[in-house]
Image (tube, rainbow, N blue to C red):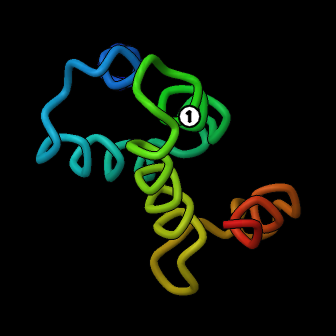
Amino acid sequence: MLSAILQKLHELKNGSIQAERQLALIDLCVSAFPDVRPWQVRKACIDGKNSLQELQPLYYTYLSLLLHPTDGHDNARNDGVLVKVKRKF
C-alpha cells in the first residue's frame, strides 16, 4: 500500500492525476503518516512540474488535515517544523 501511495505522489508531481483524485490522495497520505513523510508530500505538491500556485493549496490542505486538533496526528502536532510551515501559509 505504501509503495502505491508513493507512486501516486510521483504521478501528482508529474501532473497526471485528475483534480478530483488529488484530495483522495491527500487523505491517504494523512492516513499513512508517519510512513509517508510530510517532505514527500511537499516535494510532490511544490517541487513538481506543475506551477507552485496550482498545487500549493493541496499541500496546505494536507498540513491542515495532518495537524487538525481532533482528527490529526499527535506526533505531527508536536513537530515544531510542521506547525511553523503551516503558519507561513
Q: Residue tagged by mark 1?
A: 46
Q: Quadrant of residue 40?
A: top right
Q: What is the x, y in percent for residue 70?
A: 51, 86
Q: Amino acid at mark 1?
A: Ile
> Which residue is farthest bottom?
70
Q: How many marks?
A: 1
Q: Nearer the viewer, residue 74 or 80?
A: 80
Q: Nearer the viewer, residue 78 or 42?
A: 42
In the rendered image, the quadrant that contains the N terminus is top left
Q: What residue is shown at x 62% (from left), y 36% (from top)?
A: 37
Q: What residue is shown at x 40% (from left), y 15% (from top)?
A: 10
* Label 1 crowd (10 A; few <14 / some 14-19 / many >=20): some
Apparent side of residue 64 relative to residue 28 in the rendered image (left or right): right
In the rendered image, the quadrant that contains the C terminus is bottom right
Q: Quadrant of residue 63?
A: bottom right
Q: What is the x, y in percent for residue 20?
A: 11, 47
Apparent side of residue 61 relative to residue 33 in the rendered image (left or right): left
Q: Above or below — where is 60 with respect to 43?
A: below
Circle 1 — which element? helix
Apparent side of residue 66 relative to residue 27 in the rendered image (left or right): right
Q: What residue is shown at x 88% (from left), y 63% (from top)?
A: 80
Q: Nearer the viewer, residue 46 or 2?
A: 46
Q: What is the x, y in percent for residue 36?
A: 54, 33
Q: Quadrant of residue 12?
A: top left
> Which residue is farthest right?
80
Q: Above or below — where is 69 with respect to 55?
A: below
Q: What residue is shown at x 45% (from left), y 32% (from top)?
A: 51
